[in-house]
Image: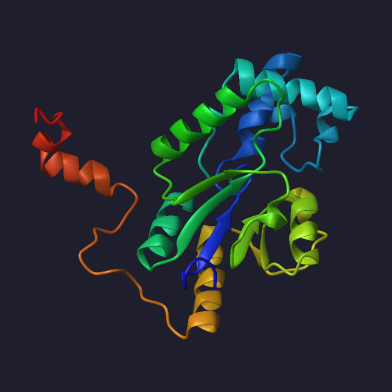
Amino acid sequence: MSDGGRFVLGVDLDGVCGDYIGTFRRIVAERLGVSSESLTRDVSWGCKEWGIRTPEEFDELHRHAVLERHMLRHMDLIPGAAEALWRLSDAGVWIRIVTHRLYVNWGHAVTAGDTAEWLDTARIPYRDLCFIAAKSSVNADAFVDDAPHQIEDLRAAGQTAIVFDQPYNRHLPGPRAADWGEVEELVRDLVVERTGSYPMQLPGIDPGADRLARRLYRHPERAAPDDG
């Protein structure tokens, strides 16, 4: 077990919590002057199916999306991600966001700021936020990722990696999750396997990703600043 007996889950963002392909597709379509529907979602790594011919061309489009269109701030949330992560967190799972988003040179301030804002807006619970390329060097009991090279590296290092299903990773063996309900089931099984039990929810905690909004609605005075 990682970190003082806690079960730590390393969670990727793009393609796992956020709909990278759907959001990037709209930006690329606008850039190319075509309809987003003309660009398939069934893409390989690098999106060559959209007519992106080289890694350099992909990098330029990605840089435009991140720095000029603030894609990482406005990315669509994958259904069920926030709710499943709250339930896991409530059961005592330590959520560690592990992402390789510092990919665009000279854009780290934008990337980090937009990521933090998106996590707040999407109400994703997390204890740690790690920006790192070599995810296998991160301490966790299991990871959820979509990138083929990351999953292969994690498994080569002896780490447990759940494949979040995307068109570009279907050549990889399981464990595989088609949605966040399946991620939750797989993680629950891993926790039981390693700890012998799985608490459904810590007592005294409101369920759901919108708990903060509900509390502010019930107690609007808590939204006011403390005058000391």
Q: Give the residue displayed 40% in from the left and 37% down from the top.
A: 120
Task: Please name the colour scheme applied to the rendered image.
Answer: rainbow
Q: Quadrant of residue 145?
A: bottom right
Q: Nearer the viewer, residue 141 or 169?
A: 141
Can you give x and y, in whole percent of width and height, for residue 104 in the image? 71, 26
Q: Give the residue displayed 65% in from the left and 36% down from the top.
A: 101
Image check: 53 left or right of 177? right
Can you give x and y, in whole percent of width and height, for residue 121 in the image? 40, 35
Can you give x and y, in whole percent of width and height, for residue 62 in the image? 72, 26
Q: What is the number of callouts on the image?
A: 0
Any part of residue 65 in sight: yes
Outermost residue, right side: 53
Q: Quadrant of residue 84?
A: bottom left
Reply above or below: 208 against 193. above
Quarter of the image that includes the C terminus = top left
Q: Nearer the viewer, residue 42 or 81?
A: 81
Any part of residue 165 in sight: no
Q: Nearer the viewer, residue 120 or 156?
A: 156
Quarter of the image that includes the N terminus = bottom right
Can you give x and y, in whole percent of width and height, for residue 5 in the image? 47, 73
Reply above or below: 82 against 222. below
Q: Give the residue displayed 62% in from the left and 26% down from the top.
A: 108
Q: Quadrant of residue 206?
A: bottom left
Q: Give the residue displayed 55% in from the left and 63% down from the top.
A: 183
